[in-house]
Image (tube, grey):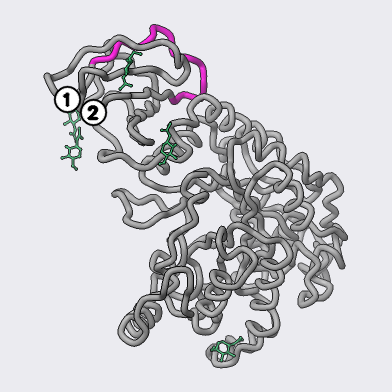
Amino acid sequence: MVTMLPSPRPTCIVLFLISVLLIGPGGAGHYEPNWNSLDARPLPGWYDEGKIGIFVHWGVFSVPGYSQFSEWLWYWWKHDQRADVVQFMKRNYPPDFKYADFANKFHAEFFDPNEWADIFKASGARYIVFTSKHHEGFTNWPSETSWNWNSMDVGPHRDLVGELAAALKKRSLRLGLYHSMYEWFNPLYLSDKASGFKTQHFVAMKTLPELRFLVETYRPDLIWSDGDWEAPDTYWNSTQFLAWLYNDSPVKDEVVTNDRWGLGCYCKHGGYYNCADRYSPSKLPDHKWEKCQSIDTRSWGYRRDMKFIEVMDLPSIIKDMVAVVAMGGNYLLNIGPMADGMIAPVFEERLRGLGAWLQINGDAIYSTTFWRNQTENNTVEVWYTTKNSTVYAILLGWPSNQPFHLITPKISATTNVTLLDYPDMRLKWKPLTPTDGLMILMPLMPPSHGNAWTLKLEGVA
Ligand SMILES: *[C@@H]1O[C@H](CO)[C@@H](O)[C@H](O)[C@H]1NC(C)=O
Ligand SMILES: *[C@@H]1O[C@H](CO)[C@@H](O)[C@H](O)[C@H]1NC(C)=O
Ligand SMILES: *[C@@H]1O[C@H](CO)[C@@H](O)[C@H](O)[C@H]1NC(C)=O
Ligand SMILES: *[C@@H]1O[C@H](CO)[C@@H](O)[C@H](O)[C@H]1NC(C)=O
Ligand SMILES: CC(=O)N[C@H]1CO[C@H](CO)[C@@H](O)[C@@H]1O
C-alpha cells in the first residue's frame, strides 16, 4: 500500500488516445496490448457479486511492527530518515543491524493457514488479497529470482502464498495476490531508474517472471498491483502482461485486476479502480471500484505499538462498508497479522462481528447493485441497495421517531416491508404521500446487531 500518491500524469492519457486512433477496440475475448482494448474487458461477475474482501499485509516488516504505516519502516528509516524511526532503530538494535536481519526473526511459528481461512470465512468475505511481495521485495513464496530474500530460503522456510492458497480453496474463498511492482532498494530497479527507465533489466529479470510464476503456480482470481507510480506502464510492460493474463493465462476467464499499472494509470486503466488509498467517492462513479480500509487506522502492516483507540470499532466498519456497497463499490478490509503468524484477537473479533452482521443482513449486500437513489436525508443515515425487484434500506442507527419515515421509495398496492432480523414479521406501514414514502411502525426494541438494520421493501419503485 502507499500512503500518498503523486497526482496522475498524462502518460497514460496520451497512450490511450494513440491506441484509440491507431488500433481501435479489441475483439470480444481477445485483447491487444493497449489500454483501449484491455479496458474494454468486462469484469468477471464474481467480483461485483462478492462485495467484501479481506486485505492481509504480512512480510518482514511485521517483525519490527513499528510506527505509522509499519510496512514502510525500511523506507522511513533509510530513505526518509524519519526521526522517530531512526531513534527506534538506534535504541533497540545493534549499530551494524541491517533491515535484512529482520528476516531471520520472521518465524511464522504459529501460522496456521486453515485457522486464518476459518476466520476469513466467518467474516463473510468472499475474497482475500494477500501480500505476495511488498515494496521491501521479500517474496512470501519461494521465488527463484529473489535469491535469499524469500520465505523459503530465510525466515519461515515455508511457502506462505501456497499454503494460504490451498486453505482458501478448500473453503471456496477467492485468492487475490497483492504484488508490488517496484522494490525500493533493489539494485536492478535502481539502475533502471538511474537510466530514466530506458533500460528494463529489473522488469525482465524480476517483475515479469515473478508475476507469471505467481499466476501459473497459484492461479489467483485477482491481482492487486501496487508500487507502479515511479515509472510509466511502458517501462513495466503492463499492457503486454495484461494481454497475456486475459488471453492466454490459466486464469484468463476469472481473473480480476485493479488499476495500478504505471504512472498516471490509476483511476483510468485496468480492471476495477482503487484510485488513491481509502478512495471514497462523493457521487456515484461510472466504473466499478473498491475501497481498501485498514482496521488499524494508522497502518496496513501490524504495529506492536497499536493503541486501542486507533482501531476501528464494529459499527464504524459496518457503516463504512454499507456506504461503499451502496455507492457501487467493493470493500476490502485490511488486517496485519503478527510476525509469528497470529491474527490479533481484536482484529479477529471485528472480522467475526462483521460476519455475524452479514449472516442477517447479507441479502442487502451480496449480489446487489446501487439503487436510483443511494441515500436520503433522514433522522438516521439511510443507504439503499437493490437486487432483482427488492429494495433494501439499511439504517445506520435505530430511529427514535415512531413511526419512521422513509422518503424515497414509490409505493404500490402490494408493497411489503420486513426487517431482515425478523423475516417472517411484516411491519405495519402507511403512505407518507399518496405515491411516495412510507411511515413504518418499527418494533419497539432494536434487534441487537452491530448498530445497523435493514428494511426489506418489496413492491416499491
Ligand atoms: C516489453 O515489450 C516490448 C514490446 O513488445 C518488447 O520489445 C520488450 O522486450 C518487452 N520488455 C520486457 C522486459 O519484456
Ligand atoms: C434535511 O432535513 C432537515 C429536517 O427536515 C432539513 O432541515 C434540512 O434542510 C434537510 N437537508 C437537506 C440537504 O435537504
Ligand atoms: C433522488 O434522486 C433524485 C435524482 O438525483 C433527486 O432529484 C431526489 O431529490 C432524490 N430523492 C430524495 C428523497 O433524496
Ligand atoms: C406482499 O405479501 C403478500 C402476502 O404474502 C403477497 O401476496 C404479495 O405478493 C407481496 N408483495 C410483493 C410485492 O411481493
Ligand atoms: C430470487 C430471484 O429472482 N433471484 C434472481 C435475481 O436476479 C439474478 C440475476 O440478476 C438471478 O440470477 C436470480 O435468480
Is disc 1 in contact with disc 2, using a CB cutoff of under 8 Å?
Answer: yes
Please give the residue where the numbered disc 1 appears in the rendered image.
436
Dot 1 beta carbon under 8 Å from ligand 3: no
Q: Is residue 382 left or right of residue 109?
A: left
Q: Secondary structure at mark 2?
A: strand
Residue shown at 75%/46% (left/top)?
Answer: 167
The boundaries of the magenta stretch are 439-452
**Quadrant including the C terminus:** top left
| Residue occupying the point 46% across, 75% down | 263
Task: Locate residue 391: give its quadrant.
Answer: top left
Numbered circle sitting on residue 409? 2
Q: Position of residue 240 (x, y in %)?
A: 54, 80
Q: Position of residue 1 (x, y in %)?
A: 57, 60
Question: Residue placed at 23% from the left, 19% from the top?
Answer: 438
In depth, the one of 334 and 370 nearer the eye is: 370
Q: Amino acid at mark 2?
A: Pro
Q: Residue at x 14, y 23 (%)?
A: 435
As shown in the figure, which amino acid type bears the numbered disc 1? Asp
Mark 1 or mark 2: which comes first in sequence? 2
x then y, percent, for residue 147? 82, 76
